Image: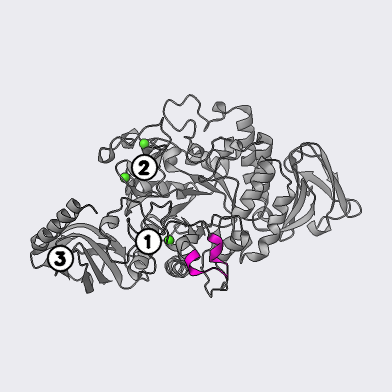
Amino acid sequence: MPRAHRILAALLCAWSLHAAPVVTKVEPPNWWMGLSIKPLRLLVHGSGFTGARLLSTGNGTVVSNVRVSASGTYLFADVALLNPGRHPFKLVAPTGSAAVPFEVFPPPARLGRFQGFSPDDVIYLIMPDRFSDANLSNDDPAVSKGLYDRSKPHYYHGGDFDGITRHLSYLRELGATALWLNPIYDNVNHLNQKERADGQPVTDYHGYGAVDFYGVEEHFGDLDKFLQLVESAHASGLKIILDMVANHCGPYHPWVEDPPTPTWFHGTVEHHLKESWQTWSLISPLAAPAIRQPVLDGWFADILPDLNQDDPEVARYLIQNTIWWIATSGIDGVRQDTLLYVPRHFWREWMAAIKRDFPRFRVVGEAFDRDPVLTSFFQGGRKAPDGIDTGVDSVFDFPQYFAIRDAFAKGKPLEEVVRTLSHDFLYPNPANLVTFLGLHDVARFMSEKGATYDGLRLAFTYLLTSRGIPMIYYGDEIGMSGGNDPDNRRDFPGGWPGDPKNKFEPEGRTGDEHALYSHIRRLAELRQHYPALRRGAMIQLAASDQVFAYARIENGQSLMAVLNNDTKPRELEVEVAPAHFRDGDPLRDLLGEAPNVAVAHGKVTVKLEPRSAALYEVRK
Ligand SMILES: [Ca+2]
Ligand SMILES: [Ca+2]
Ligand SMILES: [Ca+2]
């Protein structure tokens, strides 16, 4: 801090010691009867709290364990909840008093909420700023003027909750059953000068730089608009999975200048470790602590302040914040950012707290790594060698994502995809992995060298007929292209008034785009119709460099997929006894891409056109 700033800060501090208390924020602003966190930990932010007490008014709450930070700007208190209703507290300091608004709700309604997600679902990932703008009034809100410019990839483009709500029928028609939304926390209301692209400041349109974990980004709408979206989505048969970030906050969060506790962050702006990509050290029994520490404690991109989950107040804050979002909105799942950079014991506590109150709720965590030993280490369901079961239901199948890209986009051997499946034994529950061929952090499939519509079509055939919980990145269903971040986050064509083409409608799509969209819709229908495609055991039947046959079997239902990733026609002989097909069984291709065949001598011979697939069932 420069000298002038230090003097100013000291003066402000001296002044605040004598000024009446001012309350600027109460976290959480409300809570519910009947939830398991007892007592609730309240964090009040403001000024002039030195020597303050916190008093209940009325008979709704009981306060204990009040502590004020040395700066006099934070007050922690434990609150026991006795009755629903508006129960403001009175903060009484030697210099005066202030009201602290707080409300206690009855237990949260549960019908049709907190549903979780499973292999029965097809997830669709939306970056709220880039999907559709149905509310022009929030494009450039007064509170954060000048951050909107559709011609700039790092600026807000105007997409919002209303835009998502408007296209729920499109998403249902495609076959999606759950929406993952990138973070909707309030992000900073001015240009981000600390993070630059090509020397220019950026905006935090992507949502990953929270300045208020209890706030909603005003470019997307407000809390009521979000609750309307969740309700409409549920009414349309779509679940909501919300993105959360427990590892860091945004560089402009008020905590950065004035942390609630001395150990709130790992280090300070001036003195902190840089983030390290040496994530292998998390599982290496040989890694020295000095190698591992920057992975856990380093500041992401050297900019994002790293929260210290070993400070019990931080852990408590993050856990309550998650419970608050779930109970407030009725969402069904959470996608958690950067599992790798947070101590695993925190995930265990955090997951346990979620499941205590919302047993059906599900979480998928990001462990962005090609090594299945590392990704599987973070899936819950058994104690890892460190004695910790994270309890995290699902992780993204990044190892398979890389193989899918290599095979179906770049034309490398399909056998690589087959080989990644051999690592399934590492996971406590491979059926619960979220599988994908693209998302917001990587260049789009169609922008890979060698990518074609045929390859993308085949990749989707694989994705929607193989084990796991398939996820579609918005726009991939029409083959949108885009290079690395932020080019992979282009606006969905037709989502904005005046867009020259509306690709939400068949008339707006090219032949290739519509054929791909229709193919995915068909695959989603088949997946819905055949439980074996969702929950069935996956059995590898035959594989060579560019062809792969596998069965999905469940409760007497059996289907066999055969894929040809070669650029020339291929013929594959498959032993089908493991698929429960018998001699004489006539097999019909549900995709209409391959000739029907009959089983003879326990085998079928499948002929496939270049880069095509068949999905066989016994014709009845
Ligand atoms: Ca808008
Ligand atoms: Ca904002
Ligand atoms: Ca960390």
Residue at 24% from the left image edge and 54% from the top image edge: 1
Q: Position of residue 559 (x, y in %)?
A: 74, 52
Residue at 12% from the left image edge and 60% from the top image edge: 16
In the rendered image, which residue does mark 1 sit on? 307
For disc 1, does the CB lie below 8 Å from ligand 3?
yes
Give whichever of discs 1 and 3 has the lower sequence position. 3
Which residue is farthest front? 3
Give whichever of discs 3 and 2 has the lower sequence position. 3
Q: Is residue 162 magenta?
A: no
Give whichever of discs 1 and 2 has the lower sequence position. 2
Q: For the magenta stretch, what is the residue range?
A: 279-291
Q: Is residue 57 left or right of 430 when viewed as pictured?
A: left
Q: Position of residue 92 (x, y in %)?
A: 12, 67
Q: Secondary structure at mark 3?
A: strand
Question: Which residue is more in the foreground, 265 or 136?
Answer: 265
In the rendered image, which residue does mark 3 sit on? 90
